[in-house]
Image (cartoon, helix red, strand yellow):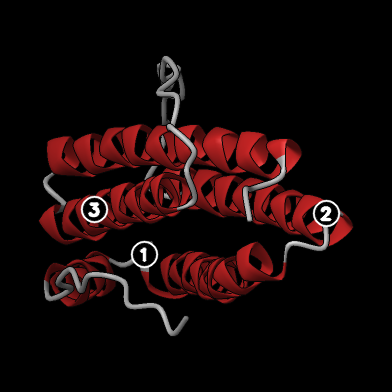
Amino acid sequence: MALDERVSEKLNDQINKELYSAYLYLTFADYYDDRGLKGFANWYMIQVQEEVAHAKILRRYLLDNGVLPRMEAIEQPTLTFANDMEPLTAALEHEQYITKSIDECYHVAHEALDLRTMKLLDWFVQEQGEEETNSRDMITNMELFGSDPKGLYDLDREYQARTFAAPTMAM
């Protein structure tokens, strides 16, 4: 069964959004790297890898369903930051935007009665819940400990330990 055209369009658009997310998180990593916060930079470099992995999952799904993905131009991130909290709040806002976009993909798949795509998107829905929680936790940690140099140092060290684990999906 071929993918519904609206479903494939939404998924293709989502690929572009995931790649934009990677670009955005690169700018966050660069900000923190420039500030000497290598752990925060590491956290966002891992995010870059995750976002690219998400795009690759969607790309593979389209290809496996007879749809040739269409690579779009990726918008340049234009955010600038005045303090260490701003990238964290921007990340939460962006993750909420991505959650809404995944929800829209799910809605279109549901309207098309495309259960296979809905199953794929179940994983993304769960993943977005985790992404939003991580973003909120980083904001809370910065609020609690970031104004103290020792606390900021400890947070940075904690984030330095994060490693990339390729996404696995139970499909």
Front label number (2 vs 1) = 2
Q: For marks 1 and 3, give the one nearer the viewer.
A: 3
Counting from the top left corner in percent of width and height, residue 162 is at: 18, 73
Residue pictured at 16% horizontal, 57% vertical: 42
Dot 1, crowdedness within 10 Å: few (<14), some or many (≥20)? many
Residue positioned 63% across, 62% down in the render: 117
Sequence order check: which comes first, mark 1 or mark 3?
3
Is residue 81 placed above or below 159 in the rendered structure? above
- Give the Cα separation between the discs numbered 1 and 3: 25 Å
The kind of secondary structure element at disc 1 is loop
As rendered, which of 17 and 64 lies closer to the eye? 64
Asked whether disc 2 touches disc 1, contact meaning CB atoms under 8 Å apart, the reply is no
Q: What whole-number distance in Å separates the C-alpha atoms at marks 2 and 1?
A: 47 Å
Q: Which quarter of the figure is the N terminus placed in?
A: bottom right
Mark linked to residue 112: 2
Q: Earlier in the sequence, mark 2 or mark 1?
A: 2
Which amino acid type is shown beneath numbered disc 3?
Answer: Gln
Q: Is disc 2 in contact with disc 3, using a CB cutoff of under 8 Å?
A: no
> Which residue does the image show at 66% across and 39% down from the upper left?
10
Residue 168 is drawn in which quadrant?
bottom left
Q: Residues within 10 Å of mark 2 (few under 14, many from 20)?
A: some
